[in-house]
Image: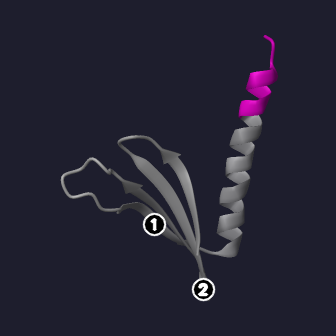
């Protein structure tokens, strides 16, 4: 299992877990509100992705970041 903390603040956390299984990859976005009355992790999104779909998601994120880099370096 791979767990990545994406955002952490005093009132909210968002993490991503990816588990590899025989039939693909189980992706879960999990939120946690430590200040809630009964704090516990909540799954906000989950999907079972094939390796090709996970590669496509990786590419989409890379393209979005590349676009941000271009915008940051564009003087006009």
Cα separation, mark 2 vs mark 1, equals 15 Å
Q: Residues within 10 Å of mark 1 (few under 14, many from 20)?
A: some
Q: Is residue 49 left or right of residue 12?
A: right
The image quarter in which residue 42 lies: bottom left
Q: Residue at x 27, y 47 (%)?
A: 35
Q: Residues within 10 Å of mark 2 (few under 14, many from 20)?
A: few
Instruction: Identify the residue under disc 1.
Output: 46
Residue 23 numbered tag: 2
Mark 1: secondary structure: strand
Q: Is residue 14 left or right of residue 33?
A: right
> Quick check: is 71 in the magenta stretch?
yes
- Relative to residue 48, is residue 28 depicted above or below? above
Percent coordinates x, y for residue 55 in the rendering: 72, 64
The furthest residue to the left? 37
The furthest residue to the top? 76
Q: Is residue 33 left or right of residue 14?
A: left
């Amino acid at each position: 299992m791979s767990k990545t903390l994406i955002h952490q603040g005093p009132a909210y956390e968002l993490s991503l877990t990816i588990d590899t299984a025989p039939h693909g990859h189980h992706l879960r976005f999990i939120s946690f509100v430590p200040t809630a009355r009964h704090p516990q992790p909540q799954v906000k999104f989950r999907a079972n992705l094939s390796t090709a779909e996970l590669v496509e998601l990786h590419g989409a994120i890379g393209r979005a970041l590349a676009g941000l880099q271009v915008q940051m370096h564009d003087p006009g």
